[in-house]
Image (cartoon, rainbow, N blue to C red):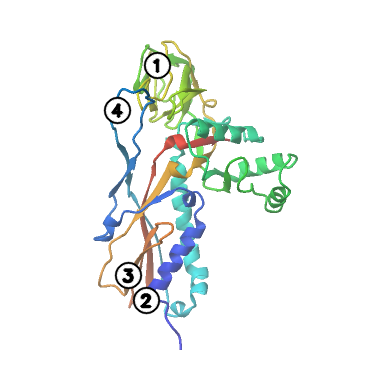
């Protein structure tokens, strides 16, 4: 006697396949807000993730009260991922392994790829970058520099990961073959052609969804225009005049003699602070441009970011030559990014509707099955409502390639 697959069996298998197919997404913070379990979430719903309070160093017998400034990052559930297909009654008599192999795995692999692709797009909200755009790293120096950058930003050494594309993986695996390494590590890399986990302070992952980025055209000899500037924008001059585009959103630059500080000790790291361009920048007829930046220039207090405000005339150096297109891998601590999902509403009047949240990954999935009398087929729809956000950009570093 044939036994039809239940919607619960399909939902559980869907979650299992999705969890196994995630690469970048599987190594970031995952949040789920059970308030949406009551009535179901909708696109645009917001989860607010609270960030810890920061303090400045203080000592002595006298009481030194510090203001408590709490901040949060909104995680917007902005995208409803969906895969739908139709099956026959005969298909529903298959065992779950066959059904998964023929239908579920292909659909969910595609969905997982889309989720991962969206997540790796967050690189353009990360301001630290090592390497040279247009040059694939072939030594350990670039990857060790990424680890140093995370150390200087007080990123915990546990749960650090690297996501690189196939070209970066091939270059570094070949380059390390002649170095002293544990025999088991070299053997695994030789057999699989992949970087091993727990190498150079990172767990390494190959991900074809690593994004490409094109630096802005740049031009001229840009410099700071005006002393004692602070905040989230920088007034500059010296650009090629009257250009519709000088910098792309996502470009990274440094300012001469403006150094980064450790967020705990507030001491200089000895490295120039890198700033992220948060919106495309053009120049006016005189070569002036105001650049929106992150992090903000803050010279004192618990949220200090730099040793000092830039001097007028201080040279601006953009990371990479103009109009260079290349990959951006990511080195990151687990808490740098988050992917949040929440329950979608259940509906009546259908053949079957099931909703389930995986306890470990916190991914919520809804599976709906209905019956079409006109075609004698059962449309099957799989949905997950989610959203990405950067929680701690300082806990990530771009790897230029």
Give the residue at mark 3.
Answer: 353
Q: Is residue 43 left or right of residue 365?
A: left
Which residue is painted at 28% across and 65% down in the image?
Answer: 346
- Give the Cα distance between marks 4 and 3: 52 Å
Tell me the distance, in whole angstroms, between the alpha carbons under discs 2 and 4: 69 Å
Residue corresponding to mark 4: 66
Q: CA distance from mark 1 to mark 4?
A: 23 Å
The answer, for residue 285, to whether it is visible in the render is yes
Return the x and y of residue 176 as percentages of the image width and height. 70, 40
Residue at 72% in and 51% down: 187
In the drawing, does residue 208 fall left or right of residue 18?
Answer: right
Q: Quadrant of residue 83?
A: bottom left
Q: Earlier in the sequence, mark 1 or mark 3?
A: 1
Residue in the image at 57% along x and 46% along y:
203
| Residue that carries the numbered disc 2 in the rendered image | 375
Q: Which residue is mark 1?
A: 309
Q: Give the mark, 3 or 2, whose residue is nearer the N terminus.
A: 3
CA distance for labels 1 and 3:
58 Å
């Amino acid at each position: 006697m044939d036994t039809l697959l239940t919607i619960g069996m399909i939902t559980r298998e869907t979650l299992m396949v999705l969890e196994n197919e995630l690469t970048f997404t599987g190594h970031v913070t995952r949040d789920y807000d059970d308030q949406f379990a009551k009535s179901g979430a909708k696109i645009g719903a917001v989860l607010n993730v609270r960030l810890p309070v920061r303090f400045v160093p203080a000592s002595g017998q006298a009481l030194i009260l510090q203001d408590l400034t709490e901040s949060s990052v909104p995680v917007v559930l902005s995208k409803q991922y969906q895969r739908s297909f139709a099956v026959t009654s005969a298909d529903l008599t298959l065992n779950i392994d066959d059904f998964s192999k023929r239908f579920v795995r292909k659909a969910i692999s595609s969905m997982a790829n889309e989720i991962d692709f969206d997540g790796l797009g967050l690189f353009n909200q990360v301001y630290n970058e090592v390497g040279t755009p247009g040059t694939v790293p072939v030594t350990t120096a670039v990857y060790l520099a990424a680890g140093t950058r995370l150390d200087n930003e007080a990123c915990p050494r546990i749960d650090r990961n690297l996501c690189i594309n196939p070209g970066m993986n091939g270059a570094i695996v070949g380059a390390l073959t002649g170095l002293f390494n544990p025999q088991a590590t070299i053997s695994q890399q030789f057999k699989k052609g992949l970087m091993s986990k727990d190498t150079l302070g990172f767990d390494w992952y190959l991900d074809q969804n690593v994004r490409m980025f094109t630096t802005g055209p740049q031009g001229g000899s840009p410099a700071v225009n005006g002393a004692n500037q602070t905040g989230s924008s920088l007034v500059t001059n010296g650009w090629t005049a009257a250009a519709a585009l000088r910098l792309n959103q996502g470009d990274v630059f440094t300012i001469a003699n403006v150094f980064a500080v450790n967020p705990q000790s507030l001491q200089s790291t000895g490295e120039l602070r890198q700033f992220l361009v948060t919106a495309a920048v053009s120049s006016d007829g005189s070569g002036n441009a105001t650049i929106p930046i992150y992090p903000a220039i803050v010279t004192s207090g618990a949220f200090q970011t730099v040793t000092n405000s830039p001097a007028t005339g201080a040279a601006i150096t953009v990371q990479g030559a103009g109009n260079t297109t290349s990959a951006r891998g990511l080195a990151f601590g687990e808490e740098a990014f988050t992917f949040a999902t929440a329950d979608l509403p259940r509906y009546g009047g259908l053949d079957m509707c099931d909703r389930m949240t995986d306890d470990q990954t916190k991914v919520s999935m809804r599976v709906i099955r209905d019956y079409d009398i006109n075609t004698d087929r059962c449309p099957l729809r799989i949905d997950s409502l989610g959203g990405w956000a950067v929680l701690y950009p300082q806990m990530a570093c771009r790897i230029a390639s």
